Image: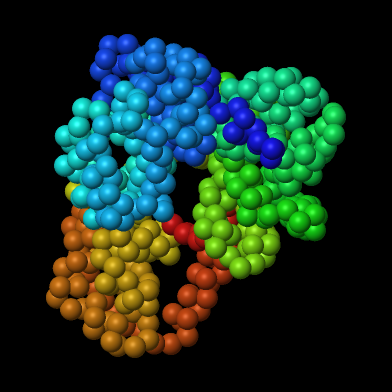
Amino acid sequence: MSYLVLARKYRPQTFEDLIGQGNVTQTLTNAIRADRVAHALLFAGPRGIGKTSVARIMAKAMNCENGPTPTPCNTCKSCKEITEGIALDVFEIDGASNRGINEIRELRENIKFMPSHSRFKIYIIDEVHMLTTEAFNALLKTLEEPPPHVLFFFATTEAHKIPITILSRCQRHNFKRIGLEEIKISLERICEGASFNISDESLRLIAGEAGGSMRDALSLLDQVMAYSEGEVSEADVLDSLGAIDRKVIFDLASALLAGDVSEALNLLDEIHNYGHDLKRLHMQMLQHFRHLVVVKMGQSAISLVGAPAHEIALMEQQVEDITLESINQIFSLLFQGEAGIRFSAQPKLALEALVIKLGQFKQLVSFDQIINKLDDVAKRLERSNGLPPPKEVFENPKQEALSVSEKKEPPYVSPRPSENLAQTWQQLLSVFNERCQSLMPSLEKAMLTKVDENLLEITVHGNSFFAARLRDEKSMDAIRKISSQFFGRKMNIKIEQVQGATFQENQLKENDRTSRLRKEALSHPIVTEALEVFQGKVVDVKIL
């Protein structure tokens, strides 16, 4: 007799044997007891979690000599035949290979006949979503009103591909992935029965690799048993499954968090040389950083991390000095690069490019740290002489320096003629830049040369085009209106045009003064402190 794999040897034979699907088994058990079993049941969910097994158990429950009963005896003729797959009245059909309209027509003809010796004639169609549209249409009427001796049990991993007309005629039961701990406990029980020594960590590793599928977990355990005789170590499990050691994942994550690109690339090269699948490595890194984000969010979210307690402790230690924003940044970039790595013909190069990109990002500062540092800067500003108090600086950061429509009193008091005209002109230019940008090309060629009680004299240097542009009626009206609002009184405007060295000398002096003030501003300790807090750079300096 050929070897029977664990996935077949330990296939559930009763509802009690089924793992992790309590919601489905409870509903079906109650339906059998109350004689409310629907004529068409649809079992939907991921692979390897017991859909077909439940269909067989339902077949035994409905055809058992002691039934219908939620606890089939597994000893009568009907139960034994169903278990062995030789029952004449239970038809298991593969939807992928019997998907055409001809097969469904044959089925429709056969259901008219009574079962040979059982209570019901049962059709189990696996992967029913593979049927063609024509086959589904041919099944509609039969599925809605089958003979009283016929039951349909459908199983599918992609319920969304089944037409709504079929779904509406079935009672649907959704299966869920089996939890890691539930799989581990089941594997542990099987190993004890087989006298196979294996550590809890190795069992947890197998359960994690199964991805919520009990069938996959049993297949992996079968592979590990074949790899090693007697007791098996965690290293043997890793070699047998071709899995990557969790320590390597932690080391690679630490290198990325520290911005150590060289170390990360060396680890990638080492993993590649061992023959590991780098696409799989990327998925594991993506999952690891997802866990790090959840762990950093606090104790209330740790239940979302499907990892043992000692790994969670290592994760907490790994992100202790790292901000949530920085972890989330790496997680987002890894997720964005998923498609490029999955479909790349050179996954190693694609993953290396992603690692180099991640290494170019500096650690982000959290919002709490920014607020704390802003408070420190605010206190320094408050202690500084000649600077506004922090209430004005930080409570109204978007307040305009000049808002004619909202304020009747201008914030700037008119200077006396003996005061610095260049500084006044710079302030006035900033207002023009906000209120009437079309005049700026001409005004930048001009200077304020005189301010009297009701007169503003502007001197234009060079091309007469700029002077003519400013002397235009609409331009004069705009200059007059803005200047009057700026000085707080009605102002007359006089536009002069000059050519010669005097204006150029004044311009050079003004440029020297502007350059000196710019250097003083950039070297101011408050500016230096702000640049350090925000890790930024100065884009422009405006001299008012």
Image position of 507 with respect to 451: above or below: below
Residue 450 horizontal side relative to residue 306, left or right: left
Tell me, what colour scheme is on the image? rainbow
Q: What is the count of numbered marks?
A: 0
Where residue 92 appears, x then y in whole percent?
41, 39
Can residue 384 be seen here? The reply is no
Image position of 286 with respect to 505: above or below: above
Residue at x 68% of width, y 54% of height: 277
* Quarter of the image where one finds residue 316: top right
* Quarter of the image where one finds residue 175: top left
Q: Residue furthest front?
A: 116
Residue 233 horizontal side relative to residue 444, left or right: right
Q: Quadrant of the C terminus?
A: bottom left
Residue 189 horizontal side relative to residue 442, left or right: right
Where residue 225 appears, x then y in whole percent?
76, 35
Can residue 223 be seen here? The reply is yes
* Quarter of the image where one finds residue 170: top left
Image position of 496 with respect to 116: above or below: below
**Residue nearest the viewer, comparing 96 with 256:** 96
Residue at x 39% of width, y 12% of height: 66
Residue at x 72% of width, y 43% of height: 241
Q: Quadrant of the N terminus?
A: top right
Where residue 73 appears, x then y in whole percent?
47, 14
**Residue nearest the viewer, comparing 467 with 325:** 325
Residue 218 horizontal side relative to residue 270, left or right: left
Residue at x 41% of width, y 52% of height: 96
**Residue nearest the viewer, comparing 354 with 541:** 354
**Residue nearest the viewer, comparing 284 with 406:** 284
Where residue 187 appears, x then y in whole percent?
66, 25
